[in-house]
Structures are given as structure tokens and as C-alpha cells.
Image (cartoon, rainbow, N blue to C red):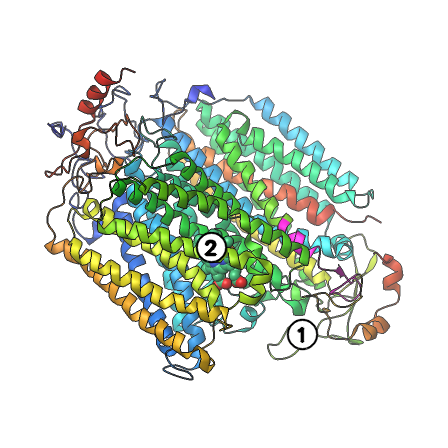
Amino acid sequence: MANVSESVHAHGDGGGDHGAHAHPDFLQHHFDTPVQQFNAAKLGMWVFIATEILMFGGLFCAYAIWRGLDPRVFDDAHHFLNKILGATNTIVLLFSSLTAALAVRSAQVGKRNLTSLYLIVTILCAGVFLVVKYFEYSHKFHLGLLPGHCFGHPGLSAAVQNGEEVGTCLRVHADSAPVMPEWVKAADEDGHVRLLSPRANMFFGLYFVMTGLHGLHVIVGMSILAWVLYKNIKGKFSPAYFTPVDLGALYWHLVDLVWIYLFPLLYLVGKPE
Amino acid sequence: MAAVDIPVAGGHAADAHGDPHANYLKAKRGIGSWLVTLDHKRIGLMYLTMVSLAFLVGGIFALLLRIELFSRGKTIVDGETYNRFFTLHGAIMVFLFIIPSVPAALGNFFLPIMIGAKDVAFPRLNLLSFYIYLVGLAILLVSIVSGAVDTGWTFYTPYSVQSSNSVISMTLGVFVLGFSSILTGVNFLVTVHTMRAPGCTWARMPLFVWGMYATALMQILATPVLAITLLLLCAERFFGIGIFDPKLGGDPVLFQHFFWFYSHPAVYIMIVPGMAINSELIATFSRRAIFGQFAIAMSSLGLALLGFLVWGHHMFAAGMSEFATMLFSALTFLVAIPSGVKVFNWTATIYKGSILWASPMLYGMAFIFLFTIGGLTGLFLGTLSVDIHLTDTYFVVAHFHYVMMGGTVIAFLGGLLYWWPKMTGKMHDERKAKIGFWFVFIGFNTVFIPQFIMGSRGMPRRYYDYLPQFEPFHKVSTVGSWILATGLFITAYTLLEALWKGKKAPRNPWNSAGYEWLTETVPPLANFHQPPVFTRGPYDYHLATPEELATGEDGREVSFTTQMAAKESTHPA
Amino acid sequence: MSAQGSHAVHAHQDDGAVHVHIASSQFYWGIFGALICLTILTVKVSYYDFGKANIFIALLIATMKGSLVAAFFMHLRHDKLFNTIAFLSSFLFLGIFILLTYDDLGNRGRVDNDYGGRFQLETGQAAPGGEPATTATSDSVAEEAPHGAAAAHGKKE
Ligand code: HEM
Ligand SMILES: [Cu+2]
């Protein structure tokens, strides 16, 4: 809410706790001082980050359970993710985190144009991340490495079900027993032909949900940063008031933080050759 | 000499939010001004309206359930419909009524006032949370219209993966409601940390605020897991990702872990606010410093923490590993400690207090009595071998109604009667309120005591039919539900009647030392005319000036300046 | 950070304006460099097999990276202590969640890697909630499963 009270007014100071503070434009009416408003905003953001971590945490819990229970399936399946693309994306996100941090720094020292520049770079990196993800996803779709009952698309070199090759994506019909391919054979990212147990659907189920939810956060983060950029260009921020830049960047770092864990857990951990 | 003149400087124009000194109900007029208001008091009232409606609807379902059970076989609806009814009753009561009830309605209204703040830290998020609540409600309505869910409010897999498609809209609705709850939690936590007025130290903070704070912690830490659980359930239905579906190699009991990791803390999200209100009621109406204020505050935090360690007690019979059942059973006993701390401290407060038997105090006493029964039966259920016998019977139903209805709802009603004068500026009719109370109290026990008995004799829950030996119990229980409903209607009528017939409320009708009673009746938009400075705790009856404890017929705010001056002369710093 | 004071209890000791620690650009670039090194490290070690330790090594490096991001990019190092507590407590509760859940699922028998489902180690019978994932009986699956499968992966347990 844009605080429209232009007039600088003092409180009726009962306690004599503070003198006549100027109420700058950005200071909302229910706060006494800018620092109070700033601390509240920061704390709110950190608490919100905690909720996000717990939300993703549910997925990490599912991952921990199923990895703990069927380590071999995870070991096998992770070869179907491309480490190089994953690492590239990691570096892209880390770089965007750097530019986000630099954007905050420029806002703190009042270099408005530099802030805009860094924000634009951050948003572009987010775009690059999504494009890479798009290629990874479409490759998985092509191979049929899909979650749950879609797992075992005919793209796999030998999707066998009850001894026969299966022609269509397998679905569970409400009334019939589930049909699942038993063992599938496919070439992994290094070109080795591998066998995957039917339970690999669990790995890909988690892969898609985790990266999907993360991707959603990337998109939300981009929109937030775009909004901050817009406000910055309009000259809303100054060294005295840069809270939205700070909070937007915090959100962006969170997106990075989640990826820092997703990348090794999904792409790297497992038995190498 | 009570109040100073309202310091409205001549040229002090009202800003966009209205004149901070105007009565909050009258600062702006028209429905439009309510819909876009950022004032926590108005948002609290809007929440109050919605949760009351939800309570009404959920209550109607409850009455229908009880009527169906009045006699054996089909009484009014068939089994399928009965399943839908109890699901709707549970989901509406839990997600639309009881979780938002105390925090979002009364908490919103009183938390900022009780710490001397002008508003919550994020007023816009506060309003947003209300609208998110409405969206969640709308989605739930879609689900009801599209055929309703029959899984129970717990949505257990694999049934929820197979049953009707309304499950999707129902889970989405609950998912959205979760965000509303999270936003309230974030807001309260930050408000308590950053907005307390000078003198409102952690040690002096009112116990209601402590309770809201502990609740906020739980809302923040538990609700996100509900969100992901429901997302996974939707993903399970759409894509069959297989995490919870045994057909795809998943584990349905894992769903229960996810669900109860939220929902056990959620039962504390429900009860801790009730306890929070009760601490205020007991202190005010015993006219005494509350016994063990620090212990009560810490036990709220203790409940918030321990609440996260015991969820497995809902799954003893679900096929958990034996090791886990033993661990969860042992941990469950720990939660009795903080609950016990509260109960003992309240009783110690009442002891030798000068008790005023006003209607809110009746509810306060009932709370202690009923919560104790509910909590103790919880211990029966937490005992492994006993639970195998009692799980999924009416004993469980009676247990959680004793804590949720006998605890939270009773405290909620008590809190409403207690704060109604401050909120609306009108006094209700005490006689009617007391009559209402006795109907509620007797009705409630009539409904649920028979359920304990038939539960321990094996009457399973969620059945629409039963064996002949249970018929008398069901009959009594159903009759009890009518008494209870009568009581609730009388109470609702009492509160509403006050709005148009009630006498003008004084500043401090109960002569309480609590902070919220220092401000003007019908608080101004900014809550206090002068930024408050607290020089004593909210239960320090021995330090409160006679002026502060006075009824204050003119309704005007106590002057903090005179108060300070008085303190400084008697208690040099 | 003392300069920010704590508003609520004390009167404001300062001018009420926001004062934060501002690090130099070079410093942020330095952190970025460290993050890149750790990324390369974690990819490199993934080509070696440390058995069960694989996941812990990966998590350790990820946590080092995460701490750098949280402490410096997200300014926790110079922020109020309670923000750090809020942040870390989410991990604490997540840990509780995972541990107590695993404590059930991890103790309910072992996974049958070839057929899915779980069985009790002592008796060989299906564990509670551990129905085999495939509709075929385990024997018939054993026949049909490509023979390379077991050999290629080596039996565990
Ligand atoms: C004093 C501490 C408490 C203990 C030891 C306790 C213990 C238990 C146990 C062991 C069960 C599972 C019974 C079963 O399904 O076999 C249970 C169920 C339940 N409890 Fe409590 N409880 C306590 C307090 C509360 C409170 C304060 C609330 C709510 C305000 C509550 C609400 C519920 C609900 C709703 C259920 C049934 C859930 C369902 O299956 O639908 N409990 N309690
Ligand atoms: Cu519980």
C-alpha cells in the first residue's frame, strides 16, 4: 500500500520513547521506524523460507524413504539423468544467485541502474535454466522415463510386459489391475544399455515432482524479480529503502538452495560404473 | 481523571487508512470499506463471520449424522450419503472452522491490541489470508456440489486415489486453506517479534499472545507438509506417481505419516488457542495474578514442540513397524506433561481467588473439566495395547470431541462472551448467556459420555448402522445433540441480540488488569489513542491502579501518561 | 547486529533508519568462486564409489554450498540471530519428520529388489503393507526377469 500521507507527522508521544520521527513515504502507518519495518519484513521472509523448506522437505522425506528402501533402483535410474546438463544448470543458478546478491548490494549503495542490470541478468539466467530443463524433460518423455503408471513408454528399447512388447503408454484403469512393464532396457546418458526394474517408476516419479515443483518456483521467482525490476526502474528504491529487492533476492536464493540439494541427490548419488 | 483528551491535532488529516482515533467500526462506512480494509480488527470480524457460518453448516451436518444414528438401519439417509456427511462434517469443522476460529478471528482482533501495536506486521497479507480462505471455501463448495467426498477428513490412500473425483477439488480446497493458515501464522509470529509496545517484554506478554505465538510456530512448521501431502495426493491421482499407491510399489501408510505429521500438530493448532483464551478467562475472573505464568507460557511452546513427535499414535493399527509403534507410544505420554502443567496452574490460580461467576468464567471452568477428560482419554489411546482395542471406535470420537469441542469450542465461546463488549461496544445479557452455557454443557456431555461407553464396548466409528445393544446409547447421544444445539442457538442469539438491544459497554466490564481492557471501548483504528507504554504485567492485580481496574462507564481509554507518572512516584525505576 | 537495535523492548536507541552490513562486490565474487569449486568437486567425486558414504559425501558438499549461500548471499551472517534460528529450525523439524518416518518404514522388512514389495528378513513373508508391486507371483517373475538382471547388479542384502 503506497502510504499517501505526505505530511510529516509526529506521534502523540505518551511514553516519550521516541522523538518526532519523520514518516518517509515508504514507511507504513503502523510501523514506528524504518528499521522496525525492515526487521519485520526480513523476519517474515525468513519464516516464509522455513515454510518453503518444509514443503520441499516432504519430497525429500519421500526421497529418503524410497532411496533407503530400494537403493539399487535409485542407483540404476540415476544414470538416466545427464550429469553435465545438471551441472550446467547448477552453475547457471549459482551465477544467478551471485547477480541477485549483487543486485541487492547495488540497491544498498544506491546504484539504481546497476541494480536493474543485475536483476535482468538474474532473470535471464532463470530463463536459461528453464530451457535446459525443457530439453532434459523432453528427452525423458521421449524415452518413456515417466513417473508411476506412465513409466515404460514404448520409446524404451525393450519395454516388456508379460513377455510381450507393449505398444502404448501403460495406464492404470480404475477397474483393472495395474499393468506394469517388468524390466525395461534402455540406453542411459552414457550410451550404456541398462536394465531398469519396474520400481524405477518411483525414481522418476520423485524426479518429476521434485524438479517440477522447483521449476514452478523458478517461474514464480522470475515473476517476483521482474516486479522488483519494474519498481526499481520506476525509482522506488534507495539506500534507505531497498526491502523488496532484498526479499526478492532472498526468494531467489531459496530457489538456488533447493537446487543445490536436488542436483546431487538426483543426478549424482549412486553407484558409478 | 481517567482519560486524557484525545490528542487530535487540528491539522492532523486522516490518512488513507482513516483517522487513527476514530472508532474502528465507524472510521469508514459501507460494505466496500470492509472488503478492502487492512484493519486487523475488521479482518478479525470478517473471519468471525465466516467461521461462524462454517460452524453452522458443519453443525447441521452433525445433527443430520446424529439423526441418522437415532435408530438402527436407515433412518434418513443411506450409507453412501452418511459417508459423505461425516466427511463434510469433519472437513468443514476442521479446516473451515476450528483451525481458523480462534487465531484468525479472536487472535486477529486482540493480538495486536494486547501487545500495544497499531496493527499486525503485514496488514495486506492479513487481508490476503482472508481472501485465500474464501477461495479455499469456494473450492470446497465445488467439491460438495460435484458429488462430495466420502473418504473421511483424513483422505487416506489408497481409497482417496480411487474414490470419486471430488477428492481432487476437496484436496485443492484444503491446500488453499493451508496457505491462509500459514499467512496468519507468519503474520502473528513477526508481529509478536517486532511490534510489541515498550514495556511489553517477553516476560510480561499476555498468555493469550503466548498461545497465539506457539500456534503460529506450529502453523508455520506443520502446514507446509500438509500442502505437499495434498499435492502428492493430486499427483497420485493425475499421474499415478506411485509414492502412496501400493499397486505401483508405493506405501499407503507413508501417506498417513505425511498426513499426521501435519495433523497431529494441527490438533494442537486447535487446542493451544483454546488454552490461551482460557488462561485469560481464569486470571480475570479469579481476580488474581495467574499462577505459574512462565510455566504456562513455556508449556505452550512445549506442546508446540512435542506435538511434532507423536503423530504415529494415529497409526498404531495401520501396520507400522513394531519399533515405531513403541517409540511413538512412549513419546505420546510426554505431551501429557505440558497439558498437565496448564491444568494444574489454572486450578492453582482459581484456588483462593475471588471468583466472579460471569458467563465467560463458566466456560473457563467447563474448559478445564472437559479438556481434562479429553486429555486423559488421549493417554488411554496412546497406550499401545489399549489402543488396539479402542482405535476406530466411538471412544476415539468421544476423545477428540472432548478436546476439540469441549476444549476449543468452549473456550472460543467463552472468549467471545468475554471480549464481545470490547469488540462491539455492547453488553450481552448475562442471564441468557448463562442459560445457554448450561444447555451447551449438559448437551455436550449427553452427546459424548455415551460414546465413550459404547466405544469401549466396540461400537466402530464411521458406520451408519449398529448392533441392537448400542441403540440406547445412540438414542441418548442424539437427544444430547439437540440439547447442545439449543444451547448454541441461545448463545448465538445472546451475542447477536446484544448488537441491537445491548447496553453500551463500559471500558472494562470484568474489571480485568489485562492490557486489552485499557483501551477505549470500541477501540480506535490505531488501537490506542496514545502509543501505550506498559509498566506492569497483564495479570499484576496488585500493581494495577484502581483507575485501570475500574469499570470505566464512559468507555474511555486509560491514560498512560498519568499511569506512568503514578508508577514513577511509587516505584522509582 | 547491534546497530539495528531491538525495537520492541527498548526505546529506539538510534535514528530508526536501516543500517546493514554491505559487503564488497569482490567478496560476492569470491563466494561464487568457492561455490563453483564445490560444484566441480561434487561432480568429480560422483565418479568414485564410496559405497554407503556416497550420499553423505554429496550431502556434505551440498550443505557446504548451502551454508555459503545462506550466510553470505542471503546475509544471515550479519543478520539478526533469530532469522538464522528460523531458518535452521526448518531443518530440525524436517529431520524429525524424516527420522521418525524412516523409523517406521525402515523397520518393516526389507525391499525385494527384483520384484518390488517388502519381505520380512526372518520369515521371508511379505511384510505388512509390503505387497509385491507386480501382479505376477514372485516365482513367475523370477522366471521371466531377464537373466542378466540379477547378475548385472549383484544381489544386495
Ligand atoms: C493430551 C494429549 C492427547 C493425547 C495423548 C492424544 C492421543 C490420541 C490418540 C492416541 C489418538 C488416536 C486414537 C486412534 O485413532 O486409535 C487420538 C486421536 C485424535 N485426537 Fe487426540 N490426544 C491428545 C489431545 C488431543 C487434542 C488436544 C486434540 C484436538 C484438539 C485431539 C484430537 C484428536 C483427533 C481429532 C483424533 C482422531 C483423528 C482421526 O482419526 O480422525 N487430541 N488422540
Ligand atoms: Cu494425535
Q: Residue at x 42, y 68 (%)?
A: B451
Residue type highlighted by circle 1 = Pro
Q: In this picture, is B470 found above or below B56?
A: below
User: What residue is shown with label 2?
Assistant: B376
Residue at 39% from the left image edge and 31% from the top image edge: B202
Q: Nearer the viewer, residue A3 or B187?
A: B187
Residue B501, x across and y down, in percent = 10, 55
Q: Whole-percent x and y of residue B336?
A: 49, 48
Numbered disc 2: what chain?
B
Give the spatial CA distance, label 1 vs label 2: 45 Å
Q: Is mark 2 within 8 Å of ligand 1?
A: yes
Specify the amino acid type for callout 2.
Leu
Res. B69 image quadrant = bottom left
Q: Is residue B246 magenta?
A: no
Q: Position of residue A249 (x, y in %)?
A: 50, 36
Under circle 2, the secondary element is helix
> Magenta residues?
C100-121
In the image, farthest residue toward the front: B352
Judge depth for marks 1 and 2 and give the one in front: 2
Q: Is-magenta flag for residue C105?
A: yes
Q: Are marks 1 and 2 in contact (CB under 8 Å)?
A: no
User: Residue under circle 1?
Assistant: A178
Q: Is residue A251 above or below residue B368?
A: above
Q: Does residue A211 appear in this view?
A: no
